Structures are given as structure tokens and as C-alpha cells.
Image (cartoon, grey):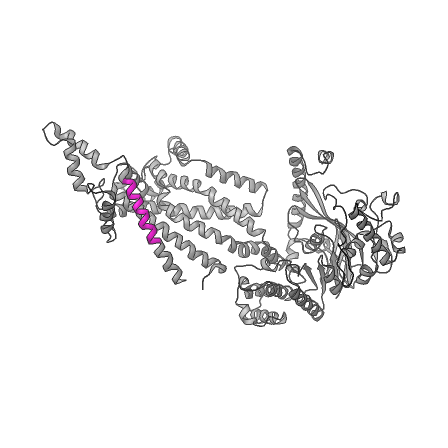
Amino acid sequence: MKAGREKKGGNYISARDTRRISRENRKITDACEKQHRRKNVPESEYVTKMRDPGNVVEFDNVHTYFFTDIGTVKAVNGVSFEIPQGKTVGLVGESGCGKSVTCLSLMQLVQRPQGQTVSGQIRFNAGDRVLDIAKTPAEVMTGIRGSRISMIFQEPMTSLNPVFRIGAQIDEVFLLHNPGMKKKEARERSIEMLKLVNIANAEGVYMMYPHELSGGMRQRVMIAIALALRPRLIIADEPTTALDVTIQAQILDLLRNLKDRINSSIMLITHDLGVIAEMADFVVVMYAGRVVEKGTAEDIFYRPCHPYTIGLMESKPVVGRHVDRLYNIPGNVPNPINMPDYCFFRDRCKFRKEPLCGGVYPEMVRLSETHEVACYCSEAVLKYDREELFKLLGKDQAEEGKA
Amino acid sequence: MWKFIVKRLIQGIVIIFLGSLIIYAVIRCLPTSFVEDMARQRAAQASSVGGKSYQEWLNQLNQVYGLDRGILPGFFAWLRKAVRGDFGDSWKYNVTVTEKFHEVIGCTLYLNIVTFLLELLICIPLGITAARKQYSRTDYAITVFALLGISLPTFFLATLLKYVFSVRLGWVDMYGLVGRNFYKMDAFHQLLDMGAHMLMPVVTLTIAGLGGLTRFTRTNMLEVLNADYIRTARAKGLPESRVISRHAFRNTLIPLVTYMSYLIPSMFSGSMITEQLFQIPGIGYTSYQAIVSGDIPFTMFYSTFLLILTQLSLLLADIMYAVVDPRVRIH
């Protein structure tokens, strides 16, 4: 690591260093894997209590690292937030900020053995008991996945297995989590699910292969699979990114209605702020593996406080407001291998105030009952009016453009 | 589907026709000529008695064997008989070609089927294990083993095996299909004796073939394991073993089946070197001997047989492809 840090950028590492790093990594990951694969783990190790019984999931200082040959990537670096029962929580941030890894950690689907949740608690209220997902062994986890927590993926075109019929793929969920269920009964319930997601020719689709369906239809099938067992939490990882806008609206509508019908929570991941505004009750903004701001949708959309959130809001087009060029946040995300020890956003920040911002990474500051932000300047930022803030940003960029 | 099969069959017939024409032309142009050798021998034998000269013998023999015609007429003369199933007599073995073929094919088939099954049994599990534990010690060990299999030439491997197991340990005979006391044994011991003689050739062929199939399985499995639908299967809550055996394996099968269909023709031709090394009287050994002595009827029969087999296995590959992959089914 030392040599890597000397040569700036960290991606140029000598072969010897790589070997040493990969040896060290193997030691760590082997230990994690051994821990993970144990059989008959006593329940006391992974059963905990929720801090607030009204929540379905509580992320508490979760760290998920990837141990690569050029160093450790801290993809999720101390994330804390909670998902209340029956609510939709939106997770936003740019590509690579750790949104997907956060939800994969919750499912224990992070690419093993390189990816490991090394510390923190992910408390999940499974109904009959509360599990700490970070410590739950693989055996127990298979019973949770698909029945209590289910997931809808980004790419409907490739998320269904091409060699099995749609019916078989939905039946599988029923048969897997209800041992002893008859094939015929599973079939009936699958067709019922297909009807529920507004597929007209349910019996016909049941016998089809994925390649015979369009993207929107496949995403409906994915939703049918995800909702089949009425999970307590649905993770939707950019469910509409690959779809066109009309279908996107239909799918979101469907998701929202079904969520209310089976009373579960949704964890919605997207970079589309419009989708978040429409769907989410709470919003969590992530940047470089950390939560920079969280609050209700109103907090985030009307009173954004973190300079990054403000930048995000400003960079989306608004109907009725005329701009020549949309705002873009200057600079790049810091190198994920050598994260700075100060605020990760400092080097790109418009509101930076020396020496205030020179300190260590800022703690979360509570602005109201629901609104929290990790920024030294939040109070200073708060004093501005919203329009004034945006103008301030816009002016800077206009000047840069001229220069 | 039927239309497709018929179309492929017609294409196949054209390819077989052209292929056998090329082979015939090449054989006729080869410097080794069975007839010339024979004429030289006869002339040498007869010269003392004052018989015919080499040239006279050559002309006479050319006429007898039908080599006085040009390449094209010669080919069509062969073809006219061949389509009726008459492939003529083997010049070297002095029996009909088909009779000789029946005599030796069993040996090769037995050798190759055993090898093929062994390869499947070893390679597919090895490849899957290597893919599941990518970049682990197991994976590296399997890769090194597979590369050794690919890199070691059969003649070296055969020699090594012979040295260790025949010369040093003396467990098995070095050459041949049957032992010295074969005809004195009862049926059961005859079978055992043949089995023991087949052992080294089978091991040689298996090790030589292991690498390719293992690497192929590993690569495909890796590709499938990174696919989105595998993540979906895991997200459904399937245990890892079911994810591998059901969702991943069915998809890995698609390229594997195609690969295996291509292996069918090589079953009849690929063991040529090994049969030669162990002097197993199989089709490889026999046809090699036929080719070096310029035996046109046998060589033609063997090549045409391989051509037909290749065409059929390609067709089989396409059909199998449709069986395992619903996306390529033609309605």
C-alpha cells in the first residue's frame, strides 16, 4: 500500500506489492468465508433487537469492503439509515457511490469472496425475529432471501434465466419456500401473480420463455417473482433504468399499488430524481460510500443542505425554468482506494470554508426530527434561500464557462 | 425444424461430394504410389527370368487398378460404385474395404468411448469447481493440471507411461491389444487381458483431452456465473448448490453440447497417433498404414466416412443446440 500511495493515484503498483496485498487479502477473506459458511451457528450470534420496532431495516455503521489486488475498496464506508415499515426509502447518488453494494449487503449477495461486510450491523425485522444480516450464516440467509426480502434488478432483459419457462421460474419461489406445496397449487398461484402484475394473457405467458417477452413484460415478471411471497421489504435496484418512459410510469405505478396492497416497504435505488420525488417517503443521499444527507422527500427536495445534494438538485432539468446548460458538479469522485481523511466532497465543494472544512470527516448533524446532514457548513448553507443557493451555483458556472 | 434439417442435409451432401473430390485428387498426386512399388518389385523379381520391364509392369498394373484414367474420370468411376455402397477392395489388406473397416473399428470405438466418458466425468466437475472458486488455490491447481494435459504431446506422455508402467513396474505390456497367452485364456480372462492392454492408451488419450474440455467448462461456467439471472436465482433464496446445478449448469450445457458434438468425428480420427504408439489395431493405425502405402480405396473410404461423420455431427450439434437452448428453436 505504501508504494501505491507514493506513486500518486494508487493504481500503479509493483508486482511484488500486488502479490503481498493479495496474500493479505486472502487471509482476511478466507477468515470471513469460514465464518460465513459455518453450519449450525447458535441463534444468539445473529439474532438482535431493533432500535425502533417500527422499522423493517436498520443499517448501523455498515462497512462493506472489496479486497482487490491493488488495495481495499471501501465501497460502503459507515452507512447508517433505517427503513420504516410500509414506507418507501429512496437511495440516490452517482454511479459507484455504493448504493447497489448497500442493498447487496442487505441481501448478502455481494460478490464473494472479494466483497465482505466487515463491520456494522444490518438489523432486519423478519417478523418472528430480528436478524443481524451481517452475521447471519449462509444457511439461514437462503430462507430470508426471496421470501422476506426480495429484489428487483436493473436489467429485465438479462435477469431471467433464458432456458427456463416463465412459469417454472415463478413456481420455483413458491416451491422453494413452501416445502410440500403441490406443483399444481404453485402453478395456480403463479398465474395469479402474473395477473396481479397486469399481464393480460397470464396462462400463455406462464408457458413462454423469457426471450418471447418485451422488456416491460419481463420486468413485470420480475416483480411477480419478487412479490410472490409477500416480502416485508422489496429492494428495487434501478427497476426502470432500462425501460422507456411510458413503461417506466406503468411499472412504478404497479410497484406502488402492490406495495400498499401487501403492506411492505420499498428500498428504491435510482439516479433518477424524478422517480424518487414521485415514489419515496424518505430519501438517503450517498456520496463515495457514505451517507451525506438523509431526510423526508420534502427535506431533501425543498431544503437540501449538503452541497452535494444541492448540486444534484441543480443538475436536473426543471419544467418551466430556462437554462442554456444544466449545472454539473465540477471535479471527480475521489479514488476509492485512497480515500482522503477529510470530507470526501471538500475538493469539489462550492461552499468550502477554510479552515472549518480542513478537519476530519464531518459527523452527521441533526437539523430537524427527520433531517440529517454530514457537513461543517450546513448551518451557513441553511441561511441561504433556496433560489439564492441555486443562483449562486449557476453564477459560478456561468463565470467558469466564460473563462 | 424439418425444413432446416433437410436443408442442412442437402448442404452436407454437396460438401461431402466436393470434399471427397479434393481428397481423391490429393491422393492421386501423392508421391507414394502403391502401383509403382508393386511394379518395381515385380520387375526386380522377373528381371532374372527375362520377364517384363518396370515400365511394362507399371502400364499393366495401372490398367488393372484403374489408374490409367485421369483424376476426374477416376474419381467418378470411384463415386459411381461408392454411392451403391461398393468401396472396392483394399490394395494393402487384400479384403474388401468395408470388411477391414468392420474388423478394426470396434477397437477404436471402445477406446474412444471409454476415453470420452472418462473425460466428461473428470472435466466437467473440475471445470465447475475451478469456476466456482476462481483465483483460489484449487483453481490454480486445476489450471496447471489442465495446461499440462494440453501441452504434453501424446508421444511423450505415451513414452513416459510405457517407461514407468511397463519397463519399471512391469504391470502392463508395452504394445498391442492382446498378450502372449491370449488364445489360451477363457473368455473372461481374454476380456481382462484386452482391458489391461487398453489401459495405457486410454490414460494417454484422456490426459491429452482433459485440458481443453476443463478449460472450456471453466470459461463457460465463469461467464454464466457472472450473469444477471444467476444473481436473480440467488436473490430468490436458492441454496448455492441448486443455483449451480440447476440454473448455471443448464446454461453451461449450451456451448458444451456443441463442443461435444464436434468431438464425435475426432473419436474416429484423433486416436491415430496413440494407436500407432501402442500398436493397437484400430482404425487410426490401419488407415495410417493404408495411407503410407498408397492404398487408394481404403484411404478414400476412411476419408469419406470422416466427412460424412463430421457433417452429421455438425447437424447433431445444431439440433442439440435447439434442444438445450429455447432461444434458437425454429418453429
**Closest to the observer, B56 or A147:** B56
Magenta residues span B12-27
**Closest to the observer, B198 or A210:** A210
Rendered view: B143 above or below A284: above
Look at 87% across and 46% down and name the residue there.
A353
Quadrant in the picture for the N terminus of chain B = bottom left
Q: Position of residue B79 (x, y in %)?
A: 25, 50
Q: Where is residue B260 in the image (x, y as percent from the top left)?
A: 43, 50
Rendered view: A113 above or below A242: above
Q: Position of residue B325 (x, y in %)?
A: 49, 58
Taking the image as shown, residue B150 lies to the left or right of residue A137, namely left
Taking the image as shown, residue B217 lies to the left or right of residue A368, namely left
Determine if the magenta segment contains residue B298. no
Look at 33% across and 52% down and name the residue there.
B14
**Residue sticking out furthest to the top:** B48
Please tell me in which quadrant of the rendered image residue A58 appears.
bottom right
How many numbered dots are placed on residues in this image? Answer: 0
Q: Where is residue A34 in the image (x, y as percent from the top left)?
A: 65, 46
Q: Is residue A297 visible?
A: yes
Taking the image as shown, residue B195 lies to the left or right of residue A60, namely left
Q: Is residue A60 visible?
A: no
Rendered view: B115 above or below A235: above
Look at 52% across and 46% down and name the residue there.
B218
**Closest to the observer, B172 or B298:** B298
Determine if the magenta segment contains residue B14. yes
Please tell me in which quadrant of the rendered image residue A370 appears.
bottom right
Quadrant in the picture for the C terminus of chain B = bottom left
Q: Dominant secondary structure of the magenta stretch? A: helix
